[in-house]
Image (tube, grey):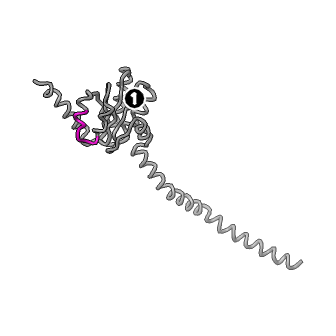
Amino acid sequence: MAKVELKQPIVDEISEQIKDAASVVVVDARGLTVAEDTQLRKQLREAGVTYKVYKNTLMKRAFEGTDFASLDDVLEGPSAIAVSKDDATAPARILAKFAKIATNLEIKAGVVEGTFYDANGMSAVAAVPSREELLSKLLGSLQSPITNFARVLNQIAEQGGASTEAPAAEAEAPAEEAPATEAE
């Protein structure tokens, strides 16, 4: 068997992974301990992110003709890719957070929803909250006016009996004072 025939299934595997990917992040994981690598892979797996080390030439071949071809320039030295099909910011967020703990992990670049980002750009992408966080913030901001309105109505209802009696008492008091000032 020729070497090309042995490598073609790996290229097809990479192509299949990136086919519907929302984002692909290239990292240099050189120097990570086994425990750190295991922890990183676990976090990525829990977020639905595929993380694997491939040869650069095989990744370049798989990236040809796709949005991810712009990553060819950063494929030097040991490289691994993190691929997410659902949450576009998940790989960048998890990798950036983990890079603070494991200083040997270096984010080289990435493509998020068809746009290439260098290492600095990926740190900005990592700062974007997850979809769930954004939806919960939106829901909270939509519920806030309704909640405040309900709270005001509740306070009015609670004070309703007391507030109708108080103005009547106040209205009677000035009426009594007024004749007294006229009599003097």
| Of the pair 80 and 135, the residue shown nearer to us | 80
Toward the right, the furthest residue is 184
Q: Check the image and name the residue furthest to the front.
A: 73
Residue 151: x and y in percent read 55, 58
Instruction: State left or right for residue 76 relative to residue 178.
Output: left
The percent position of residue 41, horizontal first and vertical second, equals: 34, 29
Residue at position x 23%, y 30% from top? 58
Q: Position of residue 67 (x, y in %)?
A: 28, 42
Main SS category, magenta section:
helix
Q: Is residue 35 left or right of residue 69?
A: right
Residue at 36 percent of width and 23 percent of height: 30
Boundaries of the magenta span: 60-67
Q: Is residue 144 above or below residue 66?
A: below
Determine which residue is flagged by label 1: 106
Identity of the amino acid at label 1? Glu
Quarter of the figure with residue 52: top left
Residue 123 left/right relative to 24: right
What residue lies at 25% left-to-right and 41% top-to-bottom?
Answer: 66
